[in-house]
């Protein structure tokens, strides 16, 4: 089966909605089914005083890429594609970027160009699946994310996922149960955005190395022998099993390794550029 798509937007960013059957090789069940459920509730918070801002306690160790290149808290529109079409809807509201996918088995991703090629790129986003079945999270790519990219995400059933985009097909490489992380800044049992961190590294041996953290806890360490890097683009993806998937992102950031010290530095501005994804 083939997935066709088109891009919209303009310089430095590509938005590619894809219609058709997702996961042709692995099957639609590769992204877990089921509605939104509360994930690993934390102990009751002490509300007698101010709650400190939560920061991840990286385990077993933090990512290597630490130079911040870009951050977006979605406080204003204009950073990402917004609007509606037959694939879905994208809107920025109250500090969130909200993507709804309108039909079964469809995916949306939106990326922008990095200021320079990176041998090491860390892309992270706070993500929650509010409705429907499917997953969402950050991605990293070379010059053409529709041809090949790596993504990491969470679904509404308490799972993390690591996958690839290969010739406009969304695939899952690994998946597992969400780690239990104590949070004192959210109500007990409430679904809340999980920090999904994807670090993409070019290995000198001619492979790519991908590490994934959920809420600061490392859950995956993947080696791919079909390299994507050096990494030229970063962004977000949402992939639906069924129509009605709603994925909410409430923060996004990109970091680089030592070579990123020569980049322009953090910025939330993304200038759109027209692009289109060719139909296979």
Image (cartoon, rainbow, N blue to C red):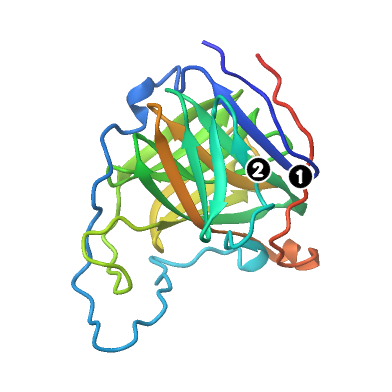
Q: Position of residue 86 (x, y in %)?
A: 56, 24
Q: Are marks 2 and 1 in contact (CB under 8 Å)?
A: yes
The residue under the point 61% across, 63% down is 65
**As drawn, which residue projects farthest toward the top?**
1
**Residue nearer the viewer, 88 or 195:** 88
**Mark 1 burial class by Cα count in 10 Å: few <14, some 14-19, many 20+:** many
Quarter of the figure with the C terminus: top right
Q: Secondary structure at mark 1?
A: loop
Q: Could one spot residue 133 in this view of the protein?
A: yes
Asked whether, in this view, residue 207 is left or right of residue 188, the answer is right
Reading the chain from its start, which is encountered first: label 2 or label 1?
2
| Res. 81 mark | 2
Q: Position of residue 253 (x, y in %)?
A: 59, 60
**Residue nearer the viewer, 69 or 50:** 50
| Res. 272 mark | 1
Q: In the rendered image, which quarter is residue 272 located in?
A: top right
Asked whether, in this view, residue 14 is left or right of residue 170, the answer is right
The residue under the point 50% across, 41% down is 99
The residue under the point 32% across, 43% down is 156
- Is residue 89 depicted above or below 248 in this figure? above
**Residue nearer the viewer, 142 or 35:** 35
Q: Position of residue 109 (x, y in %)?
A: 58, 37
Q: In the rendered image, which quarter is residue 26 located in?
A: top left
């Amino acid at each position: 089966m083939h997935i066709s798509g088109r891009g919209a937007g303009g310089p430095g960013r590509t938005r590619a909605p894809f219609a058709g059957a997702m996961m042709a090789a692995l099957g639609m069940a590769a992204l877990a089914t089921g509605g939104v459920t509360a994930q690993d509730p934390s102990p009751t918070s002490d509300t007698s005083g101010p709650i400190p801002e939560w920061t991840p306690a990286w385990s077993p160790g933090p990512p290597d890429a630490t130079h911040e290149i870009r951050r977006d808290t979605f406080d204003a529109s204009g950073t990402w594609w917004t609007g509606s079409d037959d694939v879905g809807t994208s809107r920025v509201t109250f500090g969130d970027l909200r993507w709804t996918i309108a039909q079964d088995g469809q995916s949306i991703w939106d990326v922008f160009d990095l200021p320079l090629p990176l041998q090491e790129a860390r892309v992270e986003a706070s993500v929650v699946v509010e409705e429907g079945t499917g997953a969402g999270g950050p991605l990293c790519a070379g010059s053409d994310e529709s041809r090949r990219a790596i993504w990491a995400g969470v679904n509404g059933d308490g799972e993390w996922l690591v996958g690839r985009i290969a010739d406009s097909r969304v695939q899952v490489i690994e998946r597992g149960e969400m780690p239990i992380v104590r949070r004192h800044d959210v109500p007990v049992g409430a679904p809340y955005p999980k920090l999904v961190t994807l670090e993409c590294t070019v290995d000198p041996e001619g492979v790519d190395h991908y590490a994934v953290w959920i809420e600061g806890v490392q859950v995956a360490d993947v080696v791919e022998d079909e390299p994507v890097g050096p990494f030229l683009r970063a962004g977000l993806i949402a992939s639906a099993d069924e129509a009605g998937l709603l994925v909410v992102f409430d923060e996004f950031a990109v970091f680089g390794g030592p070579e990123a010290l020569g980049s322009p530095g953090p910025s939330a501005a993304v200038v759109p550029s027209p692009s289109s994804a060719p139909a296979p």
